[in-house]
Amino acid sequence: MRFVDMAKPTEAGLNRLDALRSRAIGAFDGLYGYAPSFVVAAPGRVNLIGEHTDYNDGFVLPAAIDRHILVAVAPREDRAVRLYAADFDEMAAFGLDDLHSDADQAWSNYERGVAWALQEAHHALGGMDAVITGDVPIASGLSSSAAVEVATAHCFEVASGFELDGVERALLCQKAENEFVGMRCGIMDQYVISLGRREHALLIDCRSLESRPVSLPMGYSLVVCDTAKRRGLVGSEYNTRRQECETGARLLGLQALRDIGPEEFMVRQAELSEVIRKRCRHVVTENRRVLDAVEALRSGDLVRFGSLMNASHLSLRDDYEVSCPELDAMVEAAWRQEGVVGARMTGAGFGGCTVNLVALQAAEAFRHHVAQEYTQAIGLVPQVYICAAEERVRLLK
Ligand code: GLA
């Protein structure tokens, strides 16, 4: 098998990005009556393996994908921020001296939160006029909100003349989401959007916050299948899972579940009640699967990589209990197809998307057959996206 260090972006991806950029600039001009000074693009993300491990100080292996949130911006002399969400035709405005969340314009709380977090960290911000658009599917588990956060942070950096280190940017965006928006997410999404590399996944150590790009195999696509099942339970169940993990770590006398390997866990698991035991078993075995998956990619063992993805799905379904009939049906349909290396649910769960590693020449047939079998089983029409691993947040030239 051949590996690439830095392949070129795909033509389809470039065309989509160009179209988005024209839309953002056109909408800016039409609304504000002058041209934007710059355009920032932040990718969505898909996680290959390492689910619900980030808030346990563990390991994750996500990739940024070639679906983007774009923000066209012009700095202002005053401290006002005006935002237009072109895809919903909604406007929001706020002042940098009076930042609070707004239930009527909930979509803008990500931008407000990022402004708040940057100022809490003593970065001097100026106002701006902005237009947001994008092609990251919303509420599907591909981190459109983290992409908005990271894009917003980068816009403030460029507009206000300072530059954040990628890890610091990710941490401030996570802080915005945790403390301002009120979702207790881990660091994975903001991190990979801030630091991901084209044609690579990123192995992130969520304790040390160090990361390493891992080459993805040439000749394969990341195929993302959206179940069209919206993730209703995600907020409350996510927080419950986090608490269960914290309880497990405390009962085992650990700082975090990162601090125990599967072998020792098997010996000690009888110390835990059934539910806590299952939650912890998922996290402990998933951390090991991530490291094994990176080794499998490094040595070109795709059969092993795929079986680790599949095992991750079963563990999320049976032990962590964050899958649902729609995700299971989509994954099972994928497992039946030719050219599939591995398939699993991705993201927080309870709906949203699956991630599939599929041979490039089989991807179109895969798209067609999985969609058909899924609709037959569940009665919903899914969206299937053939994606490439994309570059981190950036200023578009
Ligand atoms: C969401 C969170 C991430 C991570 C995943 C589950 O995407 O934002 O921090 O916890 O769920 O792996």
Image: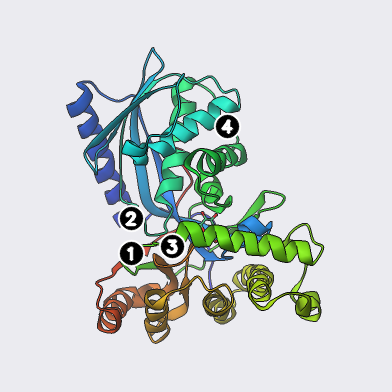
Which is more toward the observer, 48 or 274?
274
Figure check: 332 above or below 15: below
Label 4 sits on a secondary structure element that is loop
The answer to the question of whether label 1 and label 2 lie on touching residues, with beta carbons closer than 8 A, is: yes
The residue singled out by tag 1 in the image is 385
Does 253 sit left or right of 91 as displayed?
right
User: Visible in this render: residue 222?
Assistant: no
Query: What amino acid is at disc 3?
Result: Leu
The Cα atoms of the two marked residues, 1 and 3, are separated by 24 Å
Count neighbours of disc 4 (C-alpha within 10 A) and say few if under 14, some if 14 to 19, many if 20 or more.
some
The residue singled out by tag 2 in the image is 137
Looking at the image, is mark 4 or mark 2 earlier in the sequence? Answer: 2
Residue at position x 40%, y 66% from top? 353
Q: Which mark is residue 164?
A: 4
User: Visible in this render: residue 19?
Assistant: yes
Does 179 sit left or right of 76 as displayed?
right
Query: What amino acid is at disc 4?
Result: Leu
Label 3 sits on a secondary structure element that is loop
The answer to the question of whether label 1 and label 4 lie on touching residues, with beta carbons closer than 8 A, is: no
The Cα atoms of the two marked residues, 3 and 2, are separated by 18 Å
Residue at position x 25%, y 33% from top? 25
Query: What amino acid is at disc 1?
Result: Tyr
The answer to the question of whether label 3 and label 4 lie on touching residues, with beta carbons closer than 8 A, is: no
Image quadrant in which you'd find residue 300:
bottom right
